[in-house]
């Protein structure tokens, strides 16, 4: 009898282990995250008055969608819940106007954006029962005031003699943020390019005649046929808020808090070839 009972115990232990292992695997399977690849496509910059298209990408991995919520900062302004009626809901947030016919569970359109729409936008995606998995991702958007006029080149004359110094100034007025300015030199043509993110780019050219200048030095850094940038980054608002010093010794103070001016000045040396 003792021997028989001993065998029985040895057989029961594997059975108990098998049941425990099966139960553990079942619990782990229920804990697997069903949401994957949640990300947002938000314009880095957009011009004032344009419509902004925001996209929330997600992979439900076979689970049912419970809701998609959009936030500006910490305030919810749009919600999509496919099992509710109505499925689309929008909430009042200052400076935001949702175009409902163009919005759904993945796409969202903001109409005629103003500078107050600048900020962080977040998309929160939630799966339905049993997991209720939730993921949230964010991205920044900036509403840009672009200049109404092209950049202005001053100080470059039409004719120069060998050995003359070419002193040129390029100015881009009234933008937010400040435009990024770049000088280009190509044979007898001087070019200034003003750019703000990928929403604004304007170029102006000036030609000189008779003598071909050979660039020796610049006030900020060496200049060749490649673009050279003389100004602060467009993200550096300190350049927009401070006073600018002209080459004639005078100061320019920005009197309009909503208007930003960038100014660059390069001293170009000409030598005899």
Image (spheres, rainbow, N blue to C red):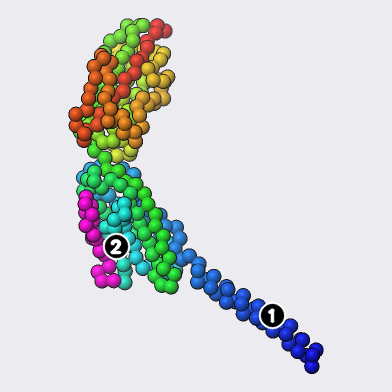
Find residue 74 and report its image quarter: bottom left
The picture places residue 84, in percent across and down from the top left corner, at 29, 71
Q: Main secondary structure of the magenta part?
A: loop
Q: Which secondary structure lies at badge 2?
A: strand
Q: Is residue 253 above or below residue 128?
A: above
Q: Residue at x 41, y 68 (%)?
A: 132
Q: Is residue 139 above or below residue 159?
A: below
Q: Residue at x 50, y 67 (%)?
A: 32
| Circle nearer the viewer, 1 or 2 | 1
* CA separation in Å, label 1 and label 2: 52 Å
Residue 70 in view in this figure: yes
Find residue 122 and report its image quarter: bottom left
Q: Nearer the viewer, residue 33 or 10?
A: 10
Q: Could you classify mark 1 by the number of other residues whose Cα lies within 10 Å: few (under 14), some (14-19), or many (20 or more)?
A: few
Reading the image, the residue beneath label 2 is 79
Mark with earlier residue (1, 2): 1
Q: Nearer the viewer, residue 157 or 33?
A: 33
Q: Is residue 239 magenta?
A: no
Range of magenta residues: 84-104
Judge left or right: residue 90 versus residue 69.
left
Q: Residue at x 40, y 15 (%)?
A: 217
Q: Could you classify mark 2 by the number of other residues whose Cα lies within 10 Å: few (under 14), some (14-19), or many (20 or more)?
A: many
Residue 155 in view in this figure: no
Q: Which secondary structure lies at badge 1?
A: helix
Residue at the outermost bottom position: 1
Question: Quadrant of the image for the C terminus?
Answer: top left
Q: Nearer the viewer, residue 221 or 214?
A: 221
The picture places residue 73, in percent across and down from the top left corner, at 31, 52
Q: Residue at x 54, y 70 (%)?
A: 28
Reading the image, the residue beneath label 1 is 14
The picture places residue 22, in percent across and down from the top left corner, at 60, 76
Residue at the outermost front position: 2
């Amino acid at each position: 009898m003792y021997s028989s009972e001993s065998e029985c115990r040895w057989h029961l232990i594997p059975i108990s282990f098998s049941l425990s292992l099966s139960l553990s695997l079942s619990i782990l399977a229920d804990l697997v995250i069903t949401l994957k690849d949640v990300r947002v496509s938000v314009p880095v910059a957009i011009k004032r008055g344009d419509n902004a298209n925001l996209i929330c990408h997600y992979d439900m991995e076979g689970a049912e969608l419970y809701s998609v919520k959009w936030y500006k900062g910490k305030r919810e302004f749009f919600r999509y819940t496919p099992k509710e009626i109505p499925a689309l809901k929008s909430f009042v947030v200052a400076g935001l106007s949702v175009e409902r016919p163009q919005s759904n569970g993945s796409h969202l359109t903001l109409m005629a954006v103003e500078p107050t729409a600048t900020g962080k936008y977040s998309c929160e995606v939630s799966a339905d029962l049993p997991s209720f998995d939730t993921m949230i991702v964010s991205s920044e958007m900036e509403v840009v005031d672009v200049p109404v006029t092209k950049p202005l080149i001053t100080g470059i004359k039409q004719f120069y003699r060998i050995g003359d110094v070419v002193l040129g100034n390029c100015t881009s007025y009234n933008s937010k943020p400040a435009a990024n300015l770049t000088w280009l030199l190509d044979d007898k043509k001087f070019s200034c390019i003003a750019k703000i993110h990928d929403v604004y780019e304007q170029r102006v050219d000036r030609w000189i005649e008779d003598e071909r200048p050979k660039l020796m030095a610049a006030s900020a850094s060496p200049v060749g046929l490649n673009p050279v940038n003389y100004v602060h980054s467009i993200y550096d608002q300190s350049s927009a808020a401070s006073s600018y010093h002209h080459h004639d010794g005078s100061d320019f103070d920005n009197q309009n808090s909503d208007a930003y001016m960038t100014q660059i000045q390069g001293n170009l040396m000409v030598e005899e070839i």
